[in-house]
Image: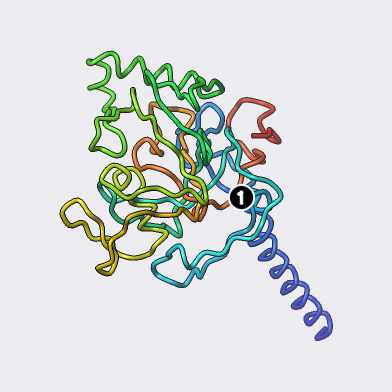
């Protein structure tokens, strides 16, 4: 009897170890919490999030405040592509170019509308990448948003917030940009305009306070004249544009924040048949 219990104990330990290895290096399940990805994903759907594609990522989960220097990312088998749906740590960007906060236990799932190196623009609620209109499953959501915005009565009753990131240049959900999406290795001049657009990411990568004095920016009393990006950045948006908290409101997502690519719906409580096993 003791030998049997001993064997069972070690089987359980081994299974737990295997589960942790899979969760850390291979992938996790993610539950869809909202309607922001309709019609692609419905609330209550469960998707498999593959970490091997972009590369597993590590940081000290016991540390209270996570910074760029705390994150280590392994190489993956592929790169982020336009149209990918991926899960990332929720982020909060202080007004204008303030601190970018990393939420360890809160996550978003959105579609990547623009990858590093792209220039994104929104015209009448539709996305344009490098001057070319993007089309896809998100078209209906954009049409609904355009109808709401163009109808003042409907807009007021729907409580749709019109103003968009970065909130100091007049961009809206209807007309936005053009916005260049930085890639790793890009160098930008530091000025009021670039700090408005990229200041939160610059501060995230430096992990230091940036002080503005007379339209100049200083780190530890050293004048900051340029910045070289360490992260590729991405513009993320929900397929249901009329009801999605995304990059239109809080800016770009650095690669540091990515958990993994959502690849498959493995559970759905929706009545529609055939959704389980559906690839994203």
Q: Which quadrant of the figure contains the N terminus?
A: bottom right
Nearest to the observer: residue 217 or residue 252: 217
Indicate whether 52 appears above or below 147.
below
Count the marks.
1
Give the residue at x 48% y 48%: 186
Element assignment for label 1: strand
| Residue located farthest toward the bottom when viewing the structure as drawn | 2
Nearest to the observer: residue 126 or residue 219: 219
Give the residue at x 32% y 55%: 225
Mark 1 neighbour class, 10 Å CA radius: few under 14, some 14 to 19, many 20 or more: some
- Can you give x and y, in whole percent of width and height, for residue 8 in the image? 78, 75
Indicate whether 162 appears above or below 57.
above
- Can you give x and y, in whole percent of width and height, for residue 166 in the image? 29, 39
Give the residue at x 22% y 54%: 216
Nearest to the observer: residue 168 or residue 103: 168
- Can you give x and y, in whole percent of width and height, for residue 93 in the image? 33, 50
20 sits left or right of 172 in the view: right
Quadrant of the rendered structure where residue 167 is? top left
The residue labelled by disc 1 is 29
- Can you give x and y, in whole percent of width and height, for residue 142 in the image? 43, 21
Indicate whether 255 appears above or below 84.
below
Quadrant of the rendered structure where residue 160 is? top left
104 sits left or right of 151 in the view: right
Q: Which quadrant of the figure contains the C terminus?
A: top right
Nearest to the observer: residue 1 or residue 177: 177
């Amino acid at each position: 009897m003791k030998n049997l219990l001993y064997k069972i104990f070690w089987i359980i330990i081994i299974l737990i170890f295997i589960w942790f290895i899979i969760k850390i290096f291979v992938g996790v399940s993610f539950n869809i919490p909202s309607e922001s990805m309709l019609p692609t994903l419905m609330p209550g759907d469960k998707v498999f999030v593959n970490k091997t594609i972009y590369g597993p990522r590590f940081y000290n989960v016991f540390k209270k405040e996570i910074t760029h220097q705390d994150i280590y990312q392994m190489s993956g088998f592929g790169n982020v592509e336009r149209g990918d749906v991926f899960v990332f740590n929720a982020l909060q960007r202080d007004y204008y170019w303030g601190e970018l906060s990393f939420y360890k236990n809160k996550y978003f799932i959105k579609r990547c509308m623009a990858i590093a190196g792209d220039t994104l623009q929104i015209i009448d609620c539709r996305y344009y990448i490098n001057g070319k209109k993007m089309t896809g499953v998100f078209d209906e959501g954009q049409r609904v948003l355009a109808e709401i915005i163009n109808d003042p009565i409907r807009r007021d009753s729907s409580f749709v917030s019109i103003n968009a990131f970065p909130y100091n240049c007049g961009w809206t959900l209807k007309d936005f940009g053009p916005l260049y999406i930085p890639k790793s290795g890009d160098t930008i001049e530091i000025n009021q305009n670039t700090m408005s657009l990229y200041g939160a990411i610059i501060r995230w990568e430096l992990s230091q306070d940036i002080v503005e004095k007379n339209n100049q920016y200083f780190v530890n009393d050293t004048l900051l004249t340029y910045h070289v990006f360490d992260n590729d950045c991405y513009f993320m948006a929900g397929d249901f544009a009329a009801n999605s908290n995304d990059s239109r409101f809080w800016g770009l997502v650095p690669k540091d924040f990515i958990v993994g690519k959502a690849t498959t719906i493995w559970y759905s409580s929706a009545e529609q048949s055939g959704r389980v096993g559906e690839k994203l």
